[in-house]
Image (cartoon, grey):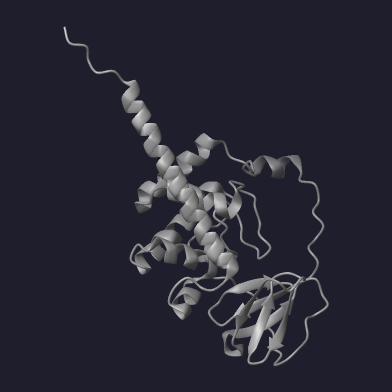
Amino acid sequence: MYGKLAIAIGLLAACLPWAHAAEQVTLRNGFALRCDHHAQIEDRVRIYLSASEDSYIEFVPDEITGFESLPDPPIETAPTASSAAQKPPAKLTAADLHEILGHAGDEHNLDVDLLASVVKAESGGNSRAVSRTGARGLMQLMPGTAAGLGVKDSFQPNENVRGGSTYLDALLVRYHDNLALALAAYNAGPQAVDRYHGIPPYRETQAYVLRVIHEFNRRVLAREAQARRASVAVPDKIRR
């Protein structure tokens, strides 16, 4: 989701939505966001996330360094046998994913169910997932963010989760263990959280925070219920 890099071109002071399929807007804080088009609305630049114009984010012009027209995505060729053998399976087994998340949770003192909830919201457990904005892997790391975290291959589950967990841990420290703010920053960037002094008024970010927290609570309750059932199932030692 952050620290994205893009080639910036000069910001047009006022313009109508572009006719091409997609653009990339680069923000002064280093983020890059893929959008359908943009337009000048009074004193703000409106970034439309879809062609329908019912989903958008607004910025003041000074927050934007440039726009770039994105080329059509390249046609993917069928992978060779050797390249396919080097790639991890897109969908990990539950046991494999739990082991990876467990190692990362132990390293950063993060609840494994929290990490699992983030992975579910970000990629659905698909280690080869790529978002519209270019985020990759289980925890959807942008290339710039991944590089800053020392992740060489975001499609490698261990590397991706290590990097994503490191970033989430840092956000929790930054926001004094306020999970909602840390998740909002994971989705929209800490600059947006700081600018609005809380969860940004972005529909996508607000829904993301609620979705992750709801899933986390569900998993914790299920874990506690399972522990209670296990304790009841083990009989006390029979007295003789």
Q: Position of residue 35 (x, y in %)?
A: 70, 72
In the image, farthest residue toward the top: 240
Residue 98 vs residue 42, the one in the foreground: 42
In the image, farthest residue toward the left: 240
Residue 187 vs residue 26, the one in the foreground: 187
Apparent side of residue 11 relative to residue 219 in the rendered image (left or right): right
Position of 172 relative to 105 (above/below): below
User: Can residue 25 be seen?
Assistant: yes
Residue at 61% in and 57% down? 136
Q: In the rendered image, which quarter contains the C terminus?
A: top left
Q: In the rendered image, which quarter contains the N terminus?
A: bottom right
Apparent side of residue 162 relative to residue 152 in the rendered image (left or right): left
Apparent side of residue 67 relative to residue 205 in the rendered image (left or right): right
Q: Position of residue 152 (x, y in %)?
A: 55, 57
Position of 209 relative to 26 (above/below): above
Position of 26 relative to 154 (above/below): below
Residue at 56% in and 36% down? 93
User: Can residue 161 be seen?
Assistant: no
User: How many numbered badges does the structure rendering display?
Assistant: 0
Residue at 44% in and 50% down? 114
Q: Position of residue 116 (x, y in %)?
A: 49, 47
Q: Position of residue 227 (x, y in %)?
A: 36, 33
Q: Name the quadrant containing residue 174.
A: bottom left
Residue at 46% in and 45% down? 218
